[in-house]
Image: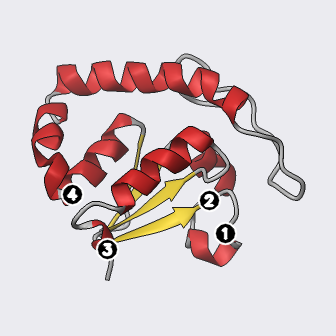
Amino acid sequence: MPTCTVYFDGDCPVCRAEIAHYQRQRGADAIAWVDASSCDEAALGQGVDRAVVLSRFHVRGADGSLTSGAAAFVEIWRRLPAFAGLATLASFRPVLAVLDAGYALFLRVRPWWRPARTGAPPAREAPDSTGRS
């Protein structure tokens, strides 16, 4: 049973590279990695909307809860020993707020890196300043 499920956008080269880095870390084998850009609906799991998990990084905990944005990265870091210190630091509200603001900026430019794909889910609007589409 995975400790969590990570939903990532495999069509985004930056996202794909970062996830590949995490997947090479000790502890990554306990995490389920789901490329939401290309998986079938069943792989997403019940109650997970593809457009939602592609618009902003999401992690589903073993308890079924969904976390997004910088807090989702912290959930991954907690499970990877090499990132445990970063997870502890990023868990402080002020640090998490700064990380989330930086992630919101990344979401604004990410559509420029994500190529159009035939057969892909419909393109999404760029997120607003809150990180929502």
Give residue 117's position: percent from left, percent from top.
84, 50
Kindly indicate whether the residue at mark 1 contacts the one at mark 2 (C-beta within 8 angstroms).
yes
* Amino acid of disc 1: Cys
Q: Please name the residue that numbered disc 3 is placed on.
A: 29
Q: Quadrant of residue 129?
A: top right
Give residue 100's position: percent from left, percent from top.
37, 26
Q: Residue at x 41, y 20 (%)?
A: 102
Q: Residues within 10 Å of mark 2 (few under 14, many from 20)?
A: many
Q: Please name the residue that numbered disc 4 is placed on.
A: 80
**Cα separation between marks 2 and 1:** 6 Å
**Cα separation between marks 3 and 1:** 19 Å
Residue 65 in sight:
no
Q: Please name the residue that numbered disc 1 is placed on.
A: 39
* Amino acid of disc 3: Asp
The tag earlier along the polypeptide, 3 or 4, is 3
**Cα separation between marks 3 and 4:** 10 Å
Q: Quadrant of residue 93?
A: top left
Can you say whether 107 is above or below 43 in the image?
A: above
Res 2 label = none
Mark 2, mark 4: which one is toward the viewer? 4
Give residue 45's position: percent from left, percent from top.
55, 72
Res 36 label = 2
Tell me: 22 left or right of 16: left
Q: Nearer the viewer, residue 64 or 71?
A: 71
Element class at badge 4:
loop
Q: Quadrant of residue 119?
A: bottom right
